Image (cartoon, rainbow, N blue to C red):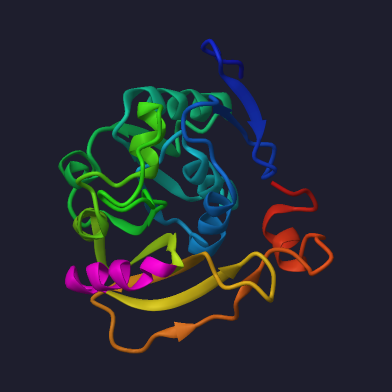
């Protein structure tokens, strides 16, 4: 199916089942963290998932691409980004499995339904309130800097949508991992799995992948670190497994 591209937009290959994504330089474009999050979340058979703050729809499309029986409720605050996501869904013929909602993720339960999903994912803004210079472009600023939507708001949005036993998966800066884990715990999303992401084996992690379970018991599993590149700069075997032989 073909869709109209707006001025300045381009089509990119998601390298998963032939999926393509509409992107626009100057707005937030998907990167390594989106691909890692979709792989870490590993949707299960027949799950109904929510992608909170879906941007242009990269993670939602990847989740749908990983399993043909998964449905995704994608929520995005910015109308321009939500429009790109909707057109990408149409481009890939996934209208029956991926629905895009334009609105605040904290209110998404009103349209999707409370406790109707078994999986929620989020690649939230990384910049702290007042802790970084705002990006020049409004769309990129909202995507990169949390404003009034901190870890607490993200966790609350996920908790409202998840069934008891449902999973919440997020990718977040390693230095702020405790903030996100504390916010999750406060909303009864008990942290259960964590994986650190390193550029090379000698580098400290910049990101962590976190999974919490609604109503889960105690016990946190540390997964082996995810190394993206070998010391010689070549792509690691794990990164090739996740994304394929190419590099971002």
Residue that lies at the very extreme toward the bottom in this rendered image:
219
Query: Taking the image as drawn, is residue 203 in sight?
Result: yes
Residue beneath the point at 74% across and 49% down: 247
Determine if the magenta segment contains residue 177. yes
Residue beneath the point at 47% across and 50% down: 70
Which residue occupies the foreground of this view, 104 or 149? 149
Magenta span main SS: helix
Up-down: is 139 above or below 173?
Answer: above
Up-down: is 11 above or below 216?
Answer: above
- Residue 58: x and y in percent read 52, 40
Report the span colored magenta.
175-189
- Residue 127: x and y in percent read 36, 50
Which residue occupies the foreground of this view, 209 or 61? 209
Up-down: is 47 above or below 102?
Answer: below
- Residue 182: x and y in percent read 25, 73
Query: Taking the image as drawn, is residue 165 in sight?
Result: no
Which residue occupies the foreground of this view, 229 or 58? 229
Residue beneath the point at 55% across and 26% down: 25
Answer left or right for 111 relative to 145: left
Residue beneath the point at 47% across and 37% down: 57
């Amino acid at each position: 199916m073909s869709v109209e591209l707006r001025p300045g937009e381009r089509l990119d290959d998601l390298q998963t089942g032939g999926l393509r994504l509409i992107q626009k330089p100057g707005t937030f474009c998907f990167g390594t963290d989106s691909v890692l999050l979709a792989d870490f979340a590993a949707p299960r058979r027949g799950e109904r998932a929510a992608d909170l703050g879906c941007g242009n729809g990269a993670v939602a499309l990847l989740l749908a691409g990983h399993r043909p029986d998964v449905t995704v409720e994608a929520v995005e605050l910015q109308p321009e980004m939500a429009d790109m996501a909707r057109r990408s869904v149409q481009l890939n013929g996934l209208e029956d499995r991926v629905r895009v909602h334009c609105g605040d993720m904290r209110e998404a339960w009103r349209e999707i339904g409370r406790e109707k999903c078994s999986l929620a994912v989020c690649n939230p803004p990384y910049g702290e309130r007042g802790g970084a210079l705002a990006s020049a472009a409004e769309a990129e600023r909202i995507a990169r800097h949390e404003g009034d939507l901190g870890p607490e708001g993200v966790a609350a949005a996920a908790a409202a949508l998840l069934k008891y036993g449902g999973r919440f998966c997020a990718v977040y800066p390693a230095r702020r991992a405790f903030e996100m884990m504390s916010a999750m715990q406060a909303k009864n999303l008990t942290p259960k799995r964590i994986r650190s992401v390193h550029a090379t084996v000698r580098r400290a992690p910049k990101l962590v992948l976190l999974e919490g379970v609604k109503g889960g018991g105690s016990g946190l599993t540390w997964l082996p670190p995810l190394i993206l590149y070998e010391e010689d700069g070549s792509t690691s075997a794990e990164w090739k497994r996740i994304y394929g032989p190419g590099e971002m």
